[in-house]
Amino acid sequence: MVFAILTGCAMPPSASDQASALKTGSQLSTANNAANSGRGPARLAAPLAYDSRLNTLPSSASNSSDASSLANAEPITAGPDVSDFQQQGRASWYGRGFHGRKTASGERYDMHALTAAHRTLPLASWVRVTNEANQKTVVVKINDRGPYARGRVIDLSYAAAAVLGMRGAGVGKVKIEGLTQQEARAAARDQSLASINPVD
């Protein structure tokens, strides 16, 4: 009996089954040709397969919670953390002769911006510089390489030198302290070039 069942499954389709399949295929081909020529009804969209993943896509309503969580996301911070860096030495400044020239970071040097050049600190890092003669401080962004003069550790912009009260002297002994990006942003809010009133 088992042999009879297996034999039945392996038998080729009958002539009537073949004729039915050919008729159905012919009807589909005719309908498609007519639809493509513009003479017949529009082609019907094929139904999705039962296992199609399109059937399980979430609705836009179910994504609303994700959207609200993105609105509360923390801002992305850029730039290195150099908070463990400390250095003491002599600082100098550079101004009008370099104004507008491209720095090592690709930015144009702006003598009126609070920036500095350092030989080893990562570009886009921020440091607090303190003039040890008068205890004035300024926070600057490292965007260039230098200084190349022997015995100097940092080259300040004209504006940064003015804040430190060392514009007239040209050089001065300073302390450099690295900052985190968060500390740098807080310091940048407190500093404004418009409020600078340098006293040499």
Image (tube, rainbow, N blue to C red):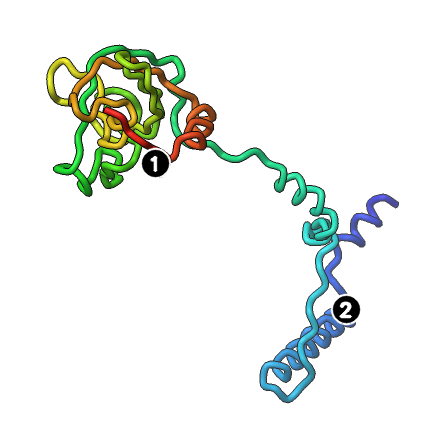
**Residue farthest to the bottom?**
39
Q: Is residue 180 above or below residue 102?
A: above
Which numbered disc, 1 or 2, marks the residue that appears first in the sequence? 2
Q: Amino acid at mark 1?
A: Leu
Residue 100: image x %, image y %? 19, 43
Q: Is residue 156 above or below residue 17?
A: above
Pointer 1: what residue? 193
- Residue located 22% across and 33% down the image: 104
Separation (CA) of disc 1 from disc 2:
89 Å
**Secondary structure under the numbered disc 1 in the rendered image:** helix
Residue at horizontal 31 percent and vertical 19 percent from the top: 129
Assess disc 1: are there few (<14), some (14-19) or many (≥20) residues with their C-alpha within 10 Å of its C-alpha: few
User: Mark 1 or 2, which is nearer the eye?
Assistant: 1
Q: How many marks?
A: 2
- Where is the N terminus found, in terms of image quarters? top right
Residue 145, percent across and down? 21, 27
Q: Is residue 58 shown above or below 188?
A: below
Q: Nearer the viewer, residue 153 or 67?
A: 153
> For this view, does 15 lie left or right of residue 85?
right
Provide the residue designation for mark 2: 17
Q: Residue at x 71, y 42 (%)?
A: 65
